[in-house]
Amino acid sequence: QLQLVESGGGLVQPGESLTLSCAASGFTFSSYAIAWFRQVPGKEREGVSCISSAGDSVKGRFAISRDNAKNMVYLQMNSLKPEDTAIYYCAASSRFLTSCDMTLRFYEYWGQGIQVTVSS
């Protein structure tokens, strides 16, 4: 059974850091690109970062990394702002090999999401 399980969310103050983890099981993890998305109630889900099966990642505010030996993907979030408050999801796509993008419809499998709240 394919599963993606996010962890590491919570409440932090502005300027602090948080690392999200995504544990994958039930599929050939190393063959899939993984992305992080986030969503605020009433708004569309948006891409945060992605990393291809080959390890190429989209550069943005947050750093994404993967450990194929552990079937894990991480999102290191530094200098968090209140507008980063959202539910964060990890997702897997078999579409990408040496690159990735964050088009939602390209991602076949999704985690249940985890809340990140940035507030003083």
Image: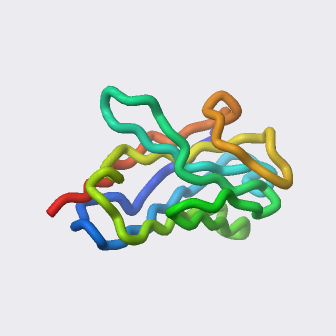
Q: Residue furthest right?
A: 98
Residue at 55 percent of width and 64 percent of height: 74
Q: In which quarter of the image is residue 38?
A: top left
Residue 22 higher or lower than 90, as above or below: below
**Residue 80 picture location, percent across and down:** 34, 64
Question: Left or right of 118: which side holds 60?
Answer: right
Question: Left or right of 6: which side holds 74?
Answer: right
Residue at 55 percent of width and 43 percent of height: 47
Q: Quadrant of residue 7?
A: bottom left
Q: How many numbered badges does the structure rendering display?
A: 0
Residue 41 higher or lower than 88, as above or below: above
Quarter of the picture containing the N terminus is: top right
**Residue 102 picture location, percent across and down:** 64, 42
Residue at 19 percent of width and 59 percent of height: 119
Nearer to us in this view, 51 or 70: 51
**Residue 44 picture location, percent across and down:** 44, 29
Quarter of the picture containing the C terminus is: bottom left
**Residue 40 picture location, percent across and down:** 34, 37
Q: In which quarter of the image is residue 56?
A: bottom right
Question: Left or right of 113: which side holds 63?
Answer: right
